[in-house]
Structure formats: structure tokens, C-alpha cells
Amino acid sequence: GNSVTQMEGPVTLSEEAFLTINCTYTATGYPSLFWYVQYPGEGLQLLLKATKADDKGSNKGFEATYRKETTSFHLEKGSVQVSDSAVYFCALSSPTQGGSEKLVFGKGTKLTVNP
Amino acid sequence: GAVVSQHPSRVICKSGTSVKIECRSLDFQATTMFWYRQFPKQSLMLMATSNEGSKATYEQGVEKDKFLINHASLTLSTLTVTSAHPEDSSFYICSARDRVKGRNQPQHFGDGTRLSIL
């Protein structure tokens, strides 16, 4: 079935460091790909998305490019801030039996940014 | 836009109690809502897909009689944990997709409910 493999954390960086969180996927067809962020004690917020190959999603300085040839959707940010400390989830959309789509999540990567 | 409200945010109750969690889409209509469960330091596990006006579709291994889902309107879905026990303690999160915008649109998540059964 469809699955997402995400870089295991935790990841600890200093402020202004470069961030990469790797994400690869296995899927049939052409899924949409997402990065979600979860701050402590809260639900998930959509960070960015890409719906087809070579699309680049971007938001708040974060970027990820849908690479079909390597089945990857790595998250990057050039200069992280303390406020970026959170858990990041890579996800893909997967069709369900009922015709709608469900999200398949990676295990999450906890990022801590120190001042 | 695309706000999902989940209530309550935290529940502490005794074993054997039934607990209802509400999920509302505040500024859009959601034909489909999703219920997830998240264990500490783990990813989200989809429990069921809730479709307005029809029965929910449960994932394998999720007890239908234990986790009752009702999706009575395009803006409200409820999850009832019946006769809750300590092993049901978890973080429950709902999400919804805007029906107007169709497929390949992101799910919008509530802030979750922390359920603690004593």
C-alpha cells in the first residue's frame, strides 16, 4: 500500500542554520504531497503542498519539491528560527474505498531550534 | 479561512464514562471529515472517515461500537468514545476537507482533544 518514510529525529539546530528533513514515498498513481506542522499541544497545520511532479510548494520560508523520479518531497528552509521548533509530518493523499481520499502520514520529525 | 473547531480540548474522566468530541467546520462545508488518533511521540493514525448523511468508514482494527461517529450535517461530526477505559487515553484529532474545492485539496485540522481516562 501507500506509505511515507520520513527522516527520524529529533533534529536540533542553531538559529539561522539550514534545515533539511527528508521524506520519500511509495504510492500507486499520482498522489498529492503535503507537509504539516504540529506545535506542542495543538493540531496539525498545513505548511505546504504539491499536487503534481516538479511542483514546488513553499510557505514561510519552507520549500519542498515533488520529485517523481526519486519519489521524494524533502522539506528545506535556509535559515531556521526558534519559532520553527515543532514536529513536522510529511503526508500523501491516498484514495479510499469510498471514493474520497485519506492522508497517509510519516512518523514525524521533531525539530528544536536553539537561540 | 478554513477553520476547524474541535471541542473539548481536554477531557479527564473516570473509567466507564462515555465521552463525546465535536468537530465543526466554521467557514466551509465539509462532506467528509476524518478522525485520527495520535499516541505520544507517534504519528497520526486514521480511525475513520466520516461522510455526511451516511455511515462512517472505519479503518481496519478500529472498533465501530467503541468509537461511534455521527456526521449529521455538513459542518459537524462527532466522535463518541463509549465506556472509555485507560487504554483509550490519547490525543484525538479531526480534520475536514472543503467540499466545494474538491479533491486534492488539503485537510484542515482541529486543535485536537486530549482524553485522559482515570
Image (cartoon, coloured by chain):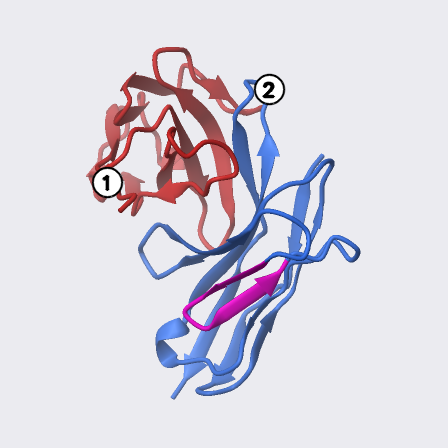
Chain colours: A blue, B red
Say which chain tag 1 marks: B
Disc 1: which residue: B5
- Residue drawn where x is 35% and y is 75% of the image: A83
> Quick one: which residue is furthest to the right in this view?
A69
Q: Residues within 10 Å of mark 2 (few under 14, many from 20)?
A: few
Callout 2 amino acid: Gln
Q: Position of residue B87 (x, y in %)?
A: 41, 35
A62 in magenta: yes
Q: Residues within 10 Å of mark 1 (few under 14, many from 20)?
A: many
Q: Position of residue B117 (x, y in %)?
A: 29, 37
Q: Position of residue B82 (x, y in %)?
A: 31, 21
For residue A35, say whether it is visible. no
Say which chain tag 2 marks: A
- Residue drawn where x is 53% and y is 81% of the image: A78
Which of the labelled discs sits on residue A97, or is there none?
A: 2
Residue A79's place in the image compared with A94, above or below, is below
Nearest the viewer among B46 and B11 is: B46
- Residue drawn where x is 28% and y is 25% of the image: B78
Callout 1 amino acid: Ser
Nearest the viewer among B55 and B68 is: B55
Secondary structure category for the residue under label 2? loop
Which of the labelled discs sits on residue B83, or is there none?
A: none
Task: Identify the main secondary structure in magenta.
Answer: strand
B38 in magenta: no
Residues in magenta, as a range: A56-65
